[in-house]
Amino acid sequence: SQTIHQWPATLVQPVGSPLSLECTVEGTSNPNLYWYRQAAGRGLQLLFYSVGIGQISSEVPQNLSASRPQDRQFILSSKKLLLSDSGFYLCAWSVGQGGETQYFGPGTRLLVL
Amino acid sequence: KNQVEQSPQSLIILEGKNCTLQCNYTVSPFSNLRWYKQDTGRGPVSLTIMTFSENTKSNGRYTATLDADTKQSSLHITASQLSDSASYICVVRKAGGSYIPTFGRGTSLIVHP
């Protein structure tokens, strides 16, 4: 069966510090991978998606970046965090050409102080 | 602009009662519509998926309806339980193999004993 892991589960970081959130998927090959952010009381905002190794599409211009160094690994990074980067970060995977179900990870709660 | 609007924003009901959540969308051309349940601090989990030709789909005490002509969907919860307390998110996909779904902001449901 397929599983998706995210870590860390929670993170408290000072403004201006770097960020690295990791997501890995097991039990499937060549998944589509997604990073979402969910601010308190808001809907899910798509940040990045990837349909293959090294292929990253950015949906929202900001101080975040994403990388996919391996087939089932997706990393969200920042060189300098802003207060507005606080939120709940969710990684998701799917397979197919579109229209398929997305399966979400447990999320990372990020608080920037 | 492709949008998904959900109502009400929040809802409080007593355990055992029924409730109905609404979703209106403007996404076109339409591929499918999903309802997700998101427990607090967790990732969303898919409840139902409906395509253009489907009017009703059930998953236990959850029943989703779709009117593709009026671009409306509803999620009916029967005999609510405390564990139904969560955010319910409507997600619509555009036809044409898009990797990017459009998320509603969700309805926050609280079930009181």
Image (spheres, coloured by chain):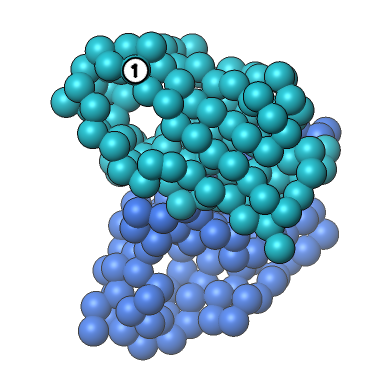
Chain B hue? blue
Disc 1 chain ID: A
Q: Which of the 4 quarters of the picture holds residue A2? A: bottom right
As rendered, which of A46 and A65 lies closer to the eye? A65
- Horizontal and vertical percent for residue A39? 33, 36
Residue at (74, 29) in percent of width and height: A51
Q: Is residue A31 above or below residue B33?
A: above
For the C terminus of chain A, give its image quadrant: top left
Q: Is residue B100 above or below residue A16?
A: below
Q: Dividing the picture into quarters, in which one does residue A87 lie?
A: top left
Q: Is residue B79 left or right of residue B48?
A: left
The picture places residue B30, in percent across and down from the top left corner, at 74, 42
Q: Vertical placement of A75 versus A72: above or below?
A: above
Q: How many marks?
A: 1
Tell me the kind of residue under disc 1: Pro
Chain A image colour: cyan
Note whether residue B33 is visible.
Answer: no
| Left or right: B109, with B90 as reference point | left
Depth check, front residue: B60 or B23: B60
Split into 4 quadrants, where in the image is the N terminus of chain A?
Answer: bottom right
User: Horizontal and vertical percent for residue B37?
Assistant: 49, 61
Work out whether A56 lies above or below B30: above
Q: Residue at x 74, y 40 (%)?
A: A31
User: Circle 1 sits on which residue?
Assistant: A18
Q: Residue at x 83, y 33 (%)?
A: B96
- Spot occupied by residue B46 in the image (x, y as percentages of width and height): 59, 60
Callout 1 secondary element: loop
Task: Please say whether residue A92 is visible from this viewpoint.
Answer: yes
Residue B75 image-quadrant placement: bottom right
